[in-house]
Image (spheres, helix red, strand yellow):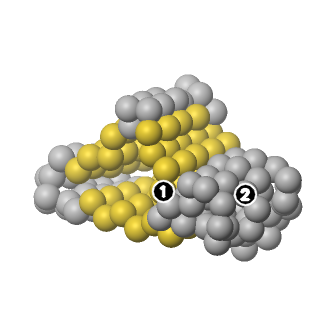
Amino acid sequence: MNVAAGSSVTTVNGGITFTANPTGTATGNFSGIHVDGATLLTLGSGNISLLGFGADQAGTQLNAGIVLRNSTLVETRSSGNITLDGTGGNGTIWNDGLHIVTNVLVNSTAAATGKITMIGRGGASTTGIDNRGVAMGGNSLIRSQGSGDLEFTGFGGSTTSSNTFG
């Protein structure tokens, strides 16, 4: 599932749910959900839920469960939770559960609610590197502006190679 730069998915009093490669067995070279410079926004009530599994093909790279990059905005306003749940596939490098880079903002402005839950599982490649549960960088920010909790859970991939963090 690809949401390209400049795209916007917005709801008013409704949720946004993306599910990609739910069995995790599709072969190829792809991330389950790839949001590149786009906006996912709920106004009023409504949750945002992304569930992605990367491709299962040895010798490939960036088979992440969920990739958010290049100024992507994921935001709930008024009320609503955000859940990002990604599992990396099989490949040689960057098979992260959640791969969040380059000015990404995951934001809840909900005053009384607005929990943000992030769960990442690195890919199971036995020969790859960088099979991280949650990988974040490049001025990205995860923020709850109300009283909602931030919850991060990361599991490194099963490889014995380098950079396999939770």
Q: Is residue 15 above or below residue 105?
A: below
Residues at marks 2 and 1, CA–CA distance in whole angstroms: 16 Å
Amino acid bearing label 2: Gly
Q: Are marks 2 and 1 in contact (CB under 8 Å)?
A: no
Judged from this view, the residue extending furthest toward the top is: 6
Q: Which residue is mark 2?
A: 128
List x then y, in percent, for residue 20.
Answer: 67, 60
Q: Is residue 19 visible?
A: no
Q: Residue at x 74, y 68 (%)?
A: 126
Residue 51 tag number:
none
Q: Nearer the viewer, residue 166 or 49?
A: 166
Q: Residues within 10 Å of mark 2 (few under 14, many from 20)?
A: many
Q: Residue at x 54, y 48 (%)?
A: 99
Residue 134 tag number:
1
Q: Is residue 125 above or below residue 129?
A: below
Is 77 left, or right, of 88 in this rendering?
left
Q: Nearer the viewer, residue 164 or 49?
A: 164
List x then y, in percent, for residue 27.
Answer: 85, 61
